[in-house]
Amino acid sequence: MMRKISRLGDSWVYLSLDAMRVHTITFLITACSLAACQAPPLRPPPEEEAGYRNAAPVIAAIDTYHRDHGHYPARLNQLVPHYLPRVHQIDASRSWEDQTGRFQYYPQRDRYGLDFTYYSSSQSHMMCYDSQTKKWEHVVID
């Protein structure tokens, strides 16, 4: 059985049902292949992933402290030992290169910020958490 599928100039193009099925299957396979060719999302470097992993319990402890006391702690060490067994806060007397794995904490009345830094071969990276938006921001330090 032939079907009239489109007009080409003054004449019609006819395709059999089998040919239409083949064209449809070919189109679907091509479309699926193109959709699968999208680049996978980039994974953050291992140092950044470690920073997020280490920050998660600190963020949870700060939020729990706030819920229990009605305000944020003035310093991260106020979370120890009731909310965290230990916390690594930035030490101003040490160089920045020695601060990997440590946090800088910025409490305010209605929100707080938490930062960590890591280093790649060519740049310093600071990841900044905002408790109000609950999002991380990436800052490159040259």
Image (cartoon, rainbow, N blue to C red):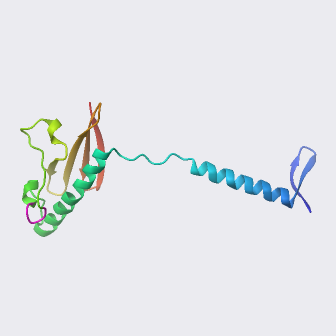
Q: Is the C terminus in the top left, top right, bottom left or bottom right quadrant?
A: top left
Q: Using the image as rendered, state which of residue 40 and residue 63 is in the foreground.
A: 40
Residue 25 is drawn in which quadrant? bottom right
Q: What residue is at 93 percent from the left and 45 percent from the top?
A: 10
> What residue is at 92 percent from the left and 63 percent from the top?
1
Q: Tell whether 99 sits left or right of 141.
A: left
Range of residues picked out in magenta: 80-84
Answer yes or no: is residue 131 visible: no
Does residue 119 lie above or below 8 as drawn?
above
Residue 21 drawn at (x, y percent): 79, 59
- Magenta region includes residue 82: yes
> Is 30 drawn above or below residue 117 in the view shown?
below
Q: Is residue 124 magenta?
A: no
Question: Residue 47 location, x and y as percent?
Answer: 28, 45
Q: Nearer the viewer, residue 127 or 108?
A: 127
x 8%, y 60%: residue: 80
